[in-house]
Amino acid sequence: TPRRPRRVSLRRNSVQNVSASEVPISKPRTSRRPSVLTPMAMMTATDFGGALRLGVRFAPISGALLDLTLDEGDADGVAVVMRMRTREPAIDAYLCEELITSCINLCRGLLGPAFKEQRIDLGYAPPRHAARYSEYFDAPVRFACRDTRVVIARHWLSVPMPAANPDTARQMLALCRAQMPSEQPPASIVHTLERRLALQVSGNPKLTDLAAELHLTDRTLRRQLRAADPDRHLPARQP
C-alpha cells in the first residue's frame, strides 16, 4: 500500500536556518478553519475530472494560500499548477509542499489508496536532500521548473465519484459560488460583517478573527472592504 504523504515540509530543516521573522508559523494565532464545501462538492461530481475542475475553481474557499490553475495540455496528463500570489522566497517551498501533500491526500480520499501522482515539478532549486523527494512522494520530482505542479495521469479523470448526484451537485455548486470572494458583490461583504458583528454579544472581535470565519485572509478581507467603501477607516494590521 502506498504511503500516505504527511502534512510536513521536506524543507523544515532549511527554514529553521533563516531569521525568526522568516520562519513559517505552523500554528497561526488565528485558525483559518478551512471550508469543507469544496471537497464535498468534488464528491458529488460525475467523475474525477469534473471533481478536479471544481477543486481548482473553488480552491480559495478551502483555505488555499496559493493560486491554482489547471493545465490540461501537459504531456504526462493533467496538471494542477500552483503559484504564489506574492513572492516570498523564505516560505515559497514550505507553502508549495504543504499544498502538494494536501492535494495528494484529497485525491487519495476520492480515488482510494491506489492513486499515485504521475509527476511533481517544483519551481525552485533542489536542496541538499533533493534525493529524498522522489522517495517521499513516490513519484518523479523535478526541480528548477518554470512553475510548481502536480501532474495526474489522464486515466484517473474518468473514475466515477463516490457520491455523484446531479441534484446535490447543483446545490453544492451554488453554495461554493456564494462563498467565493471574487463572485460576491463588493457591498455584500459589508452586510456579511454587520450580521456577524450583530451576533457578537460580548467583546470586540478582531478583524483577523472575522476574516478566518469567512475563510478569507486578513489582506483579502481588507481589500474587499476598501472596494465596498473606500472612505471606511480600517484598523492597522496586527504583526
Image (spheres, rainbow, N blue to C red):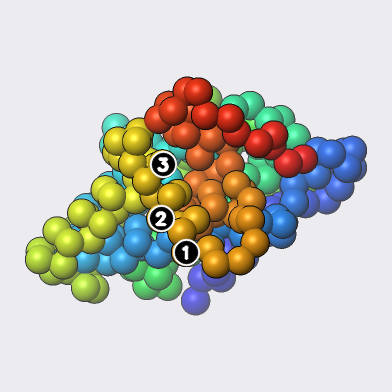
- Under circle 1, the secondary element is loop
Residue 35, can we see it?
yes
| Left or right, 79 with reference to 138 | left
In front of the other: 216 or 210: 210
In front of the other: 83 or 61: 61
Quarter of the image with the C terminus in it: top right
- Distance between the Cα atoms at labels 2 and 3? 9 Å
Rendered location of residue 38, percent (x, y):
35, 58
- Under circle 3, the secondary element is helix
- Distance between the Cα atoms at labels 1 and 2? 7 Å
| Left or right, 135 with reference to 69 | right
- For residue 9, above or below residue 68: below
Rendered location of residue 179, percent (x, y):
34, 50
The residue beneath circle 3 is: 190
Q: Are marks 1 and 2 in contact (CB under 8 Å)?
A: yes
Outermost residue toward the left in this view: 167
Sequence-first disc among 1 and 3 = 3
The residue beneath circle 1 is: 199
Q: Amino acid at mark 3?
A: Val
Q: Amino acid at mark 2?
A: Arg
At a point 31% along the width and 66% down the height, the residue shown is 40
The residue beneath circle 2 is: 195
| Left or right, 97 with reference to 164 | right
| Left or right, 38 with reference to 24 | left
At a point 80% along the width and 44% down the height, the residue shown is 23
Rendered location of residue 166, percent (x, y):
10, 64
Q: Are marks 2 and 3 in contact (CB under 8 Å)?
A: no
Q: Are marks 1 and 3 in contact (CB under 8 Å)?
A: no
Q: Amino acid at mark 1?
A: Leu
In front of the other: 55 or 8: 55
